[in-house]
Amino acid sequence: MQQLDITVVDLTVIGFYFTVIFAKGFQIARRTHDANDLFLAGRRLGWFPIGLSLFASNISSTTLIGLAGAAYTWGIAVANYE
């Protein structure tokens, strides 16, 4: 088993990353007041970002891997489902 050597530079990069992520999270948390802000973006989004969100939720790595396996088993016509 290899020994993992973590240097000061590695810890600095990890610490910087977590600091930026926490700062962005707190910044967004201050603008979130109720469930509409959290789940519906305050009802400010247009049709295009909502459509992209639905598409990204539907087409995931599981779908792509599953369709490739199904196409191998039953033929390429399975892809017509998507």
Image (tube, rainbow, N blue to C red):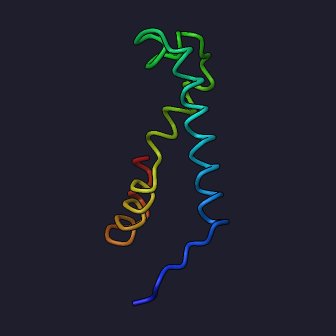
In this picture, is 15 found above or below 69?
above
Quadrant containing the N terminus in the rendered view = bottom left
**Residue at the spot x=59%, y=56% of the render?**
14
* Quarter occupied by residue 76: bottom left
Estimate the x, y position of residue 63 in percent, counting from the top left.
Answer: 41, 53
In this picture, is 49 found above or below 56?
above
> What is the residue that sits farthest to the front in this orientation?
8
**Residue at the spot x=39%, y=56% of the render?**
62
In this picture, is 17 found above or below 8?
above
**Residue at the spot x=34%, y=64% of the render?**
70
Is residue 64 or residue 4 the one in the foreground?
4
Q: Is residue 70 left or right of residue 6?
A: left
Is residue 44 or residue 72 the one in the foreground?
44
In this picture, is 29 found above or below 55?
above
Number of numbered discs present?
0
Estimate the x, y position of residue 75 in percent, counting from the top left.
Answer: 38, 67
Q: Is residue 57 left or right of residue 49?
A: left
Estimate the x, y position of residue 79 in percent, counting from the top left.
Answer: 44, 55
Estimate the x, y position of residue 7 in percent, counting from the top left.
Answer: 61, 72
* Quarter occupied by residue 36: top left
**Residue at the spot x=54%, y=79% of the render?**
5
